[in-house]
Image (cartoon, helix red, strand yellow):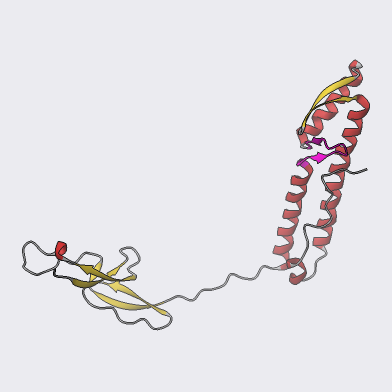
Amino acid sequence: MKIKIVHQFDPETRLYLGPFTLDDTDLSPLEEDVHLIPGDCLEQSPPAAPDGFRVVAEGNTWALVAIPPVVPPPAPSLEDLQSTLTRDATAHRWALETGGITLPNGVKVLTGIDDQTRITSVIAGMEAEGYPTVDFKAASGWIELTLAELRTLRGFVAGHVRACYSAERSHHEAIAALDTVAAAQTYDLAAGWPSPVITI
């Protein structure tokens, strides 16, 4: 078997990839013992690349090209960090506010905007029509509630929502008062939020 070592490069970047072996399947049908050189290969051996350089194919030869230095991104400013923290605090409040609560009896109730409106609407309907109880679809399953129990439920939901907004405001004010980048980078955004599990 007749073999020939050539040197391959990436067709797009022209970066040297390494040696490539040609065998009998690459022999020319027109010239005896002559291998056909693929278009992404050169016969010439590439030079050794010193630190900070890489080998690329230029035409029918190799060249050394300097590797551009990696420029680190600029460090975030205090204002950038405060803006990110403030946005994250609001996102956390929204997720916690609408994520539901677990009542002292273990029932889980959703607390999204639509859920809050639905509870108020059911209470208004019970008051207007004098219904003694109502079937209520909680996140944890069906329950039957009296008007008094539904009002208590609304109070729990309202209290949870209020606590979420109060915590968000406290975070916003604390973030605005930060005066160094280090303080912003170590700010504990996870602290001070109400628990979704209601206890009495």
Kindly give the residue lying farthest to the front in the view shown.
Answer: 1
Total marks in image: 0
Q: Is residue 160 above or below residue 183?
A: above
Q: Nearer the viewer, residue 141 or 43?
A: 141
109 part of magenta stretch: yes
Which quarter of the figure is the C terminus placed in?
A: top right
182 part of magenta stretch: no
Q: Residue sitting at 72 percent across and 54 percent down?
A: 88
Q: Name the chief secondary structure element in magenta.
A: loop
Q: Is residue 168 above or below residue 141?
A: below
Q: Which residues are magenta?
A: 98-111
Q: Residue sitting at 23 percent across and 69 percent down?
A: 21
Q: Quadrant of residue 188?
A: bottom right
Q: Residue sitting at 61 percent across and 70 percent down?
A: 74
Q: Nearer the viewer, residue 76 or 120?
A: 120
Q: Quadrant of residue 173?
A: bottom right
Query: Relative to residue 158, is residue 43 drawn left or right?
Result: left
Q: Nearer the viewer, residue 134 or 10?
A: 134
Q: Is residue 57 above or below residue 155?
A: below
Residue 77 rendering spot, x and y as whole percentages: 69, 68
Residue 76 rendering spot, x and y as whole percentages: 67, 67
Residue 145 rendering spot, x and y as whole percentages: 87, 25
Q: Quadrant of residue 171?
A: bottom right
